[in-house]
Amino acid sequence: MKTVMILMKNENEQEYLKERVKVEEQNNVQKKKKKIMIKKNQLMKMVELKQFLGKEVFEIDKMEKIENQN
């Protein structure tokens, strides 16, 4: 009877460990996705800033050309 109890305990521990591994893997995937989204958002902000600055530089160039014509 003791051996049956020990075998059942081992099976339960193995199932528990399998579940823990699954949960840890899911957590790691979620963390990676979150990091990717943060990086994506940072890149988008940089692109928007670059576009905005590009427009500002273009406007300044236009103004300088007009001043040079006068």
Image (spheres, helix red, strand yellow):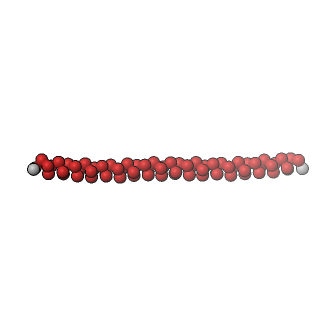
Q: Residue furthest right?
A: 1
Name the residue: 88% across, 47% down: 2
The image position of residue 42, as x and y in percent, is 43, 49
Horizontal relation, residue 62 to residue 34: left or right? left
Q: Depth check: 64 or 49 in front?
A: 64
Q: Depth check: 56 or 29 in front?
A: 56
Horizontal relation, residue 60 to residue 26: left or right? left
Name the residue: 20% across, 48% down: 61
How many marks do you count on the picture? 0
Q: Residue furthest left?
A: 70
Name the residue: 72% across, 51% down: 15
The image position of residue 25, as x and y in percent, is 61, 49
Horizontal relation, residue 51 to residue 27: left or right? left
The image position of residue 70, as x and y in percent, is 9, 50
The image position of residue 5, as x and y in percent, is 85, 50
Name the residue: 40% across, 49% down: 43
Q: Depth check: 38 or 33 in front?
A: 38
